[in-house]
Image (tube, rainbow, N blue to C red):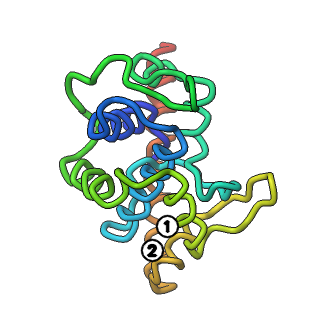
C-alpha cells in the first residue's frame, strides 16, 4: 500500500468535480485528509496511502501537497498548477476512475457533503481541533498512522494489527515491484 499518484489524482479530481471543477488547494488538501481519516476509522486503511504532516494550516497529505506544488506525470495531465488565489482546477476530466473503489468514492462524497461548502478557513480551524495535529510553528511535524488511529480511539491491539498489516502489504508491493524490474531487465 504505497502512495499511488493516479489514485490520489482520481480522488482529488472527484472532489474537484463535486465542487464544479475548481477549488482552493488548502481546502482540497483538507478534504483529502478528512477522507483518509474517515477511511482509517471505517476500514483501518487510508484512501491515499500518503504520508501525513502537521503544518500551520492543519494536517496535510505530504506527497499530495508536493504534487500540487511541483506537479506529477498523471496529476499534471488532469489537475492544474495553483493559480490566482492558490486555486487548482481540472485540466481534463477523468473519463473513468480505475483506482478508486465505490466505497472510497462514497467516503469522498460524504466528506464533501459535510465540508465541501464550508469556507477553507473554517475547515482549517476544524483541523486545528484534531488530536493528532500539533502546531509546527512554521515548519512541519510528521503525523504517524498510530497518531491518527489513537485520535480515532482505536485500541492499542487494533492499532498494532492495522499498522502491521499495512506494513506487510507495503513489503509485498516492494517485492513485486523488484521482481517486475528484474523481469524487464532480462
Mark 2 surroundings within 10 Å by alpha-carbon count, few (fewer than 14), some (14 through 19), many (20 or more): few
* 2 and 1 marks in contact (CB < 8 Å): yes
Quarter of the figure with residue 63? top right
Residue drawn at 25 percent across, 51 percent down = 109
Instruction: Report which residue position mark 2 lands on.
Output: 161
Left or right of 81: which side holds 32?
Answer: left
Label 2's element?
Answer: helix
Tell me the distance, in whole angstroms, between the alpha carbons under discs 2 and 1: 5 Å
Quarter of the figure with residue 79? top left
Q: Position of residue 128 (x, y in %)?
A: 60, 67
Q: Position of residue 46 (x, y in %)?
A: 41, 56
Residue drawn at 45 percent across, 43 percent down = 173
Label 1's element?
Answer: helix
The relative height of residue 75 versus residue 149 in the rendered view (above or below) is above
The relative height of residue 126 versus residue 104 in the rendered view (above or below) is below
Instruction: Report which residue position mark 1 lands on.
Output: 164
Q: Position of residue 30 (x, y in %)?
A: 49, 52
Residue drawn at 47 percent across, 21 percent down = 80
Amino acid at each position: 500500500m504505497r502512495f499511488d499518484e493516479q489514485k490520489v489524482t482520481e480522488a482529488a479530481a472527484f472532489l474537484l468535480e463535486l465542487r464544479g471543477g475548481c477549488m482552493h488547494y488548502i481546502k482540497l488538501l483538507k478534504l483529502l485528509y478528512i477522507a483518509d481519516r474517515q477511511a482509517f476509522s471505517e476500514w483501518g486503511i487510508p484512501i491515499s496511502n500518503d504520508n501525513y504532516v502537521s503544518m500551520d494550516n492543519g494536517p496535510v497529505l505530504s506527497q499530495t501537497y508536493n504534487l500540487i506544488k511541483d506537479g506529477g506525470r498523471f496529476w499534471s495531465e488532469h489537475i492544474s498548477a495553483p493559480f490566482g488565489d492558490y486555486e487548482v482546477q481540472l485540466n481534463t476530466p477523468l473519463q473513468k476512475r480505475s483506482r478508486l473503489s465505490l466505497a472510497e468514492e462514497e467516503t469522498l462524497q460524504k466528506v464533501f457533503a459535510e465540508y465541501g461548502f464550508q469556507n477553507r478557513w473554517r475547515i482549517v480551524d476544524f483541523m486545528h481541533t484534531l488530536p493528532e495535529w500539533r502546531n509546527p510553528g512554521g515548519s512541519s511535524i510528521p503525523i504517524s498512522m498510530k497518531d491518527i488511529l489513537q485520535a480515532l480511539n482505536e485500541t492499542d491491539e487494533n492499532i498494532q494489527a492495522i499498522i502491521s498489516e499495512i506494513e506487510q502489504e507495503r513489503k509485498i508491493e516492494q517485492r513485486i515491484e523488484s521482481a517486475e524490474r528484474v523481469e524487464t531487465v532480462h
